[in-house]
Every structure is written in C-alpha cells, then in structure tokens.
Image (cartoon, rainbow, N blue to C red):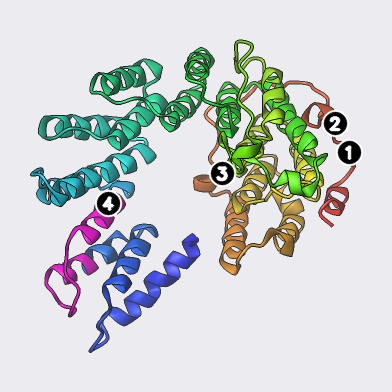
C-alpha cells in the first residue's frame, strides 16, 4: 500500500492494541509490524515485538517470521546496529532449516543496506558473514550493487571476481544491477565495459540499459544525450503502436518474452555503447522490448526537469500522453505524476499547473486507488511548500543548452502545443 495506507494501519493498531481483551492473530501482528516499519513508526513495531516476546497474545509466538521483518525494517530505518545484533543473536549456522533461515536473515540485512546505499556497513556485515558461513548468491548481489553505486566499478568488480572464485556464475540480474549502480555515478566507460560483458554472455538489452543511460547522462547533465535516449524510447513506442493489439501483447519484458514462440534472439552485431543510443533501437524493436518501463519514464521526467526547460518537460509529457491511447502496455504510475510535479516545481510553474496535474491524475484511465491519488495530492502540496525532502535538488546542474523541442519527440506526428490546455486534450 501507499504511505497513507500504512499510516492509517498504524493508527488503527494503536487504538486497538491497548483495548482489554485484544487478541490479534499472528497474521495481524505481522501486518502491523510491517506497516509500522515502512511508515517511520519503528517504536510501534518494537512495542509489538516486545509484546510477542512476552507472550501477551495467545497463539502468537516469536520466531523466524518476526525476526526477518525486524531485521529488514530496522536496517531500512537506519538502525543498522540493532538490525545486525538481532541477526547475530538469532543466527544458527548448523545444518538444516535453521541455517537456511540464518542465511536469509543476512540476505535481508544486506538487501536493506544496499537499498539505503550504506556501502561501509554492507561490507562490514559481508566480511562477518564470510568469517562465519558461506555467502549466498543474494548476498553477493546486494554487496556488488551497493559497491557499484557508492564506490564505483573497480570495487564492484572485486566483489564479482570473489563471487566467481567461490563457484558462483554471475547471473543476468546482477550484471544489470551493477550496470545501474555504475550509471548513477555517471561513469560511461564502465557502463560500456559492462555492456560488452553482457553481450559476450548473450544477455539481452532491456529497459535496464535505457534506465542506466538516463541515470548516467542525468548525472553528467548532458541534455543532448538525454534527448537522444528519449528518441530511442519514442522510436520503440512508435514501432509498437503500429502493431495490432494482439501482437502488442507479445511484449518482451526485461529480455524475457511473454510468449517463447515469438522470441527473437538478441543480435550484437556491433559494439554497444551508451554514447550511440540509436544502435539499440533496431534490437528493441525486433524483440518488441518494453523499454517504456515506468521506472525509465519517471527517470526521464526527473532528468529533463533537472537539466532541461519547462517546455521540454511538457513536450515529453505530451508525447507520452499521445502514445498512451495507442500502446496498451504504456501505463502511467503515481511516480510519473510526482516526477512531473517535481519538475514543474523546479521551474516555479507548479502553482500554475497544479489544478491541471490533479485533474490528469484523477482520470479513471489511470486506475489509481483512492490512497494513490491521495499520496499524489500530498506530494504536490509538499512541492508547492518547497519541501526539500521531496524536491531533491540535483547534485549537478547542466549548463544552459539550446536545442529544439522536437529533439524530445521523434516520429510521433505530434504538433507543437502552445499551452498545457492543449496537452490536456491528448489525455481525452
């Protein structure tokens, strides 16, 4: 659920937990603890944990099901030492199910540290694991990912080599995770090296590559390259829109075709590099690859908002709106609306366009729940207030770059619009 859903769940739990005769089931406790940990209510989660340890509720006993929730949640909330101590205190490295559960607890701890980009803590935990048990594939994946994003390719490469030395083959998702991590640092050469390895292992390029390119060039503030990669996404959308609806359903997602009978083997006839976006287009189109993933589109909106102009932001949004009626797999997410609001706030235009954004967001075609709509509204208000926690000013800012707005729209047949009202018409 959304943040609003989780906070509501916490309030309901708080009103009931002290009621005489209250006897929740284990499922109820699990959901309450999970909601509290993901709603910045760690204290509420710890109170429930203590109640379970003291056996206050009949039929609810502590164990692996509760330990793993606390370990992951505490680490996500920055309470790394407590999460590690709980993991270590409940560890059992003997053979059998207990050892598997212990390994999973460490995997969850490292996953949370990777997600919060705590590289030093992740390395310390990983070293402890290496001294007590054999690391798992999931552990290596988390450590390699956080090292790539926080320390760079060389440190991630050492982790991958250690992984191979211990008898593991680096799976596709780990290479893609490392690619994304390196891209966030703006290291194009390292990204190209990883692309070469992926090609050598016949790993199909997917929306992950587009995401990496957008993140890398956004970090560098290179608006021209962002425009060219936008062109790749638009070209793939345009080709997909020409297909009949039945063929559109045969979409390939992250290199995995929905129907194996329609699979097309990836062709790496030329050296792939992020500096030549157009070289990816034919492969994406041939495999009917979904490169307009919601995460990619959100990153594009953020990147253009940071480094482009307000007109370029709106032109990109118009292009996506035009394709939404023609491409059945193009779905708008709440994060995309939030990215649009943030981008307009950066250009001091959100107050002017707030009613329009909220009207678009309430369109039934989005399929958003009440909670999702409410979350978007809260986000828009936070942007208008100038809340830095949601505006997230960029680390780097591109130098002013003069380019035609058409650089962000390729082969769509769209005409230049003069106002946001014209853009609104594309949604209807």
Q: Please give the residue where the numbered disc 3 appears in the rendered image.
A: 391
Nearer-N-terminus badge (3/1): 3
* Mark 4 or 3: the one toward you: 4
Q: In which quarter of the image is residue 300?
A: top right
| Residue at position x 79%, y 44% in the image | 323
Q: Quadrant of the C terminus?
A: bottom right
* Mark 3 or 1: the one toward you: 1
Q: In this view, does 415 lie above or below 71?
A: above
- As measured in the structure, the alpha-carbon distance from the residue carrying label 4 to the one carrying label 3 is 26 Å
Residue 197 image point, x, y percent: 47, 16
Contact (Cβ within 8 Å) of mark 2 with mark 1? no
Contact (Cβ within 8 Å) of mark 3 with mark 1? no
Q: In this view, does 237 lie to the left or right of 297?
A: right
Badge 1 marks a residue whose secondary structure is: loop
Query: Which secondary structure is most common in the magenta stretch?
Result: helix
The crowding category of the residue bearing disc 1, from other C-alpha atoms within 10 Å (few below 14, some 14 to 19, many at least 20), is some
Nearer-N-terminus badge (4/3): 4
Q: Please give the residue where the numbered disc 4 appears in the rendered image.
A: 74
Numbered mark located on residue 414 in the image: 1
- As measured in the structure, the alpha-carbon distance from the residue carrying label 1 to the one carrying label 4 is 49 Å
Badge 3 marks a residue whose secondary structure is: helix
* Mark 1 or 4: the one toward you: 1
The question of residue 384 being in magenta is answered with no
Residue 121 image point, x, y percent: 25, 34
Nearer-N-terminus badge (2/4): 4
Residue 26 image point, x, y percent: 26, 72
Residue 184 image point, x, y percent: 49, 27
Nearer-N-terminus badge (1/4): 4
Q: In this view, does 241 lie to the left or right of 38?
A: right
Q: In which quarter of the image is residue 55?
A: bottom left
State the extent of the magenta-drawn residues as a range.
48-74
């Amino acid at each position: 659920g959304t943040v609003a859903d989780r906070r509501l769940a916490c309030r309901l739990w708080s009103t009931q937990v002290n009621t005489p005769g209250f006897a929740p089931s284990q499922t109820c406790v699990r959901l309450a603890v999970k909601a509290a940990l993901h709603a910045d209510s760690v204290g509420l989660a710890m109170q429930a944990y203590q109640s379970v340890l003291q056996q206050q509720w009949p039929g609810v006993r502590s164990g692996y099901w509760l330990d793993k929730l606390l370990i992951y949640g505490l680490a996500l909330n920055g309470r790394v030492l407590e999460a590690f101590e709980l993991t270590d205190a409940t560890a059992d490295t003997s053979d059998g199910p207990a050892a598997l559960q212990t390994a999973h607890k460490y995997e969850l701890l490292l996953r949370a540290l990777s997600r919060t980009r705590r590289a030093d803590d992740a390395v310390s935990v990983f070293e402890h694991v290496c001294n007590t048990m054999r690391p798992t594939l999931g552990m290596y994946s988390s450590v390699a990912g956080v090292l790539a994003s926080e320390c760079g390719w060389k440190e991630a490469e050492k982790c991958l080599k250690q992984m191979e030395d211990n008898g593991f083959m680096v799976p596709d998702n780990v290479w893609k995770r490392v690619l994304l991590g390196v891209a966030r640092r703006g290291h194009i050469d390292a990204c190209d090296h990883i692309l070469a390895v992926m090609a050598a292992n016949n790993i199909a390029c997917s929306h992950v590559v587009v995401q990496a390119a957008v993140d890398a060039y956004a970090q560098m503030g290179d608006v021209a390259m962002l425009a060219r990669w936008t062109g790749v996404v638009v070209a793939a959308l345009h080709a997909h829109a020409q297909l009949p609806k039945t063929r559109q359903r045969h979409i390939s997602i992250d290199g995995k075709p929905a129907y194996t009978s329609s699979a097309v083997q990836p062709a790496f006839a030329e050296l792939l590099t992020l500096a030549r976006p157009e070289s990816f287009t034919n492969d994406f189109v041939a495999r009917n690859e979904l490169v307009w993933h919601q995460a990619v589109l959100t990153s594009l909106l953020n990147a253009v908002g940071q480094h482009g102009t307000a007109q370029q932001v709106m032109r990109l949004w118009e292009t996506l709106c035009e394709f939404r009626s023609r491409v059945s797999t193009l779905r708008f997410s709440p994060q995309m609306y939030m990215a649009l609001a943030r981008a307009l706030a950066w250009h001091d235009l959100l107050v002017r366009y707030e009613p329009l954004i909220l009207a678009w967001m309430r369109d039934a075609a989005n399929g958003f729940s009440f909670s999702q709509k409410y979350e978007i509204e809260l986000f828009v208000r936070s942007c208008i207030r100038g809340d830095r926690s949601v505006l997230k000013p960029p680390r780097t800012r591109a130098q002013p770059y003069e380019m035609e707005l058409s650089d962000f729209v390729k082969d769509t047949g769209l005409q230049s619009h003069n106002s946001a009202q014209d853009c609104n018409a594309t949604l209807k």
